[in-house]
Amino acid sequence: MPPLFLASASPRRRELIAHLGVSCTIVPSAFDETSVENAPTPEAYVLAAAIGKAFDVAQKREGIVIGVDTDVVDPSGNVLGKPSDPDTARSMLKSLAGRTHRVLSGVALVESAHGTIQRQSTAVVETRVTMAPLDDDAIDAYVATGEPFDKAGGYGMQGAAMAFVTRIDGDPSNVIGLPLWTLAEMLREFQIPLWGTQEAIS
């Protein structure tokens, strides 16, 4: 079986992929996401970013590379990145509070050998998340924890912001940053055994 690489430095993705029982090497991608920021739709953006990350690592390593990009899309259709300061974090949370927004992940699986791409598979996964109404005090207290600053959309469902989420429609692991069911299906396409057996999720 060719080696498996995860083109991400995210500790959350490392933890999530471990649930699939596969062994992978972490190789953070140097792909510049601003190069695809003019994509016509949020779906096209996350997919282009995922492919870019996977290809960046595939040019350096031989094997199968997983590239993922996850972003929050506010109710107005704006892609929210990671807030750079407290005011931006507050603004993001206010735009999401009391409303339903989308979390989109692009996933790309790319196999490289002898300097060329042998095959690839891609997917876009959507999860809808509804947040409770939040007053300024709740938002300020959450921002003060520092948790929003490395999270797309300014919140982490796996952390304190779990208390803000009232409904999830779709894969909850997608909201954390890696849609496990979709990735498991893609790995099966590439004959990567999960939990030590190919038939474990048949």
Image (cartoon, helix red, strand yellow):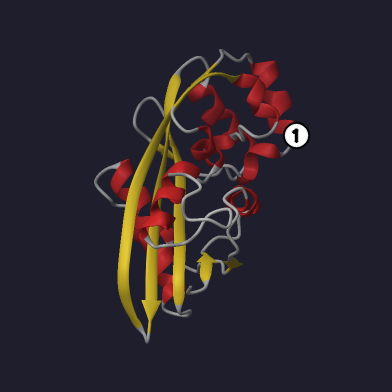
What residue is at 45 percent from the left and 59 percent from the top? 67
Front-lying residue, 201 or 31: 201
Q: Position of residue 95 (x, y in %)?
A: 48, 24
Question: Dot 1 corresponds to which residue?
Answer: 145
Q: From the viewer's perspective, is 6 left or right of 145? A: left
Q: Position of residue 35 (x, y in %)?
A: 35, 61
- Dot 1: element: loop
Q: Does residue 42 appear in the picture of this structure?
A: yes
Q: Does residue 179 appear in the picture of this structure?
A: no
What residue is at 51 percent from the left and 67 percent from the top? 29
Identity, as a three-letter code, of the amino acid under mark 1 = Thr
What residue is at 29 percent from the left and 52 percent from the top? 38
Which residue appears farthest toward the bottom when viewing the image? 114
103 vs 164: above or below: below
Front-lying residue, 66 or 149: 66
Q: Quadrant of the C terminus?
A: top left
39 vs 85: above or below: below
49 vs 153: above or below: below
Front-lying residue, 50 or 90: 50
Q: Position of residue 132 (x, y in %)?
A: 56, 14
Q: How many marks?
A: 1
What residue is at 47 percent from the left and 33 percent from the top? 171
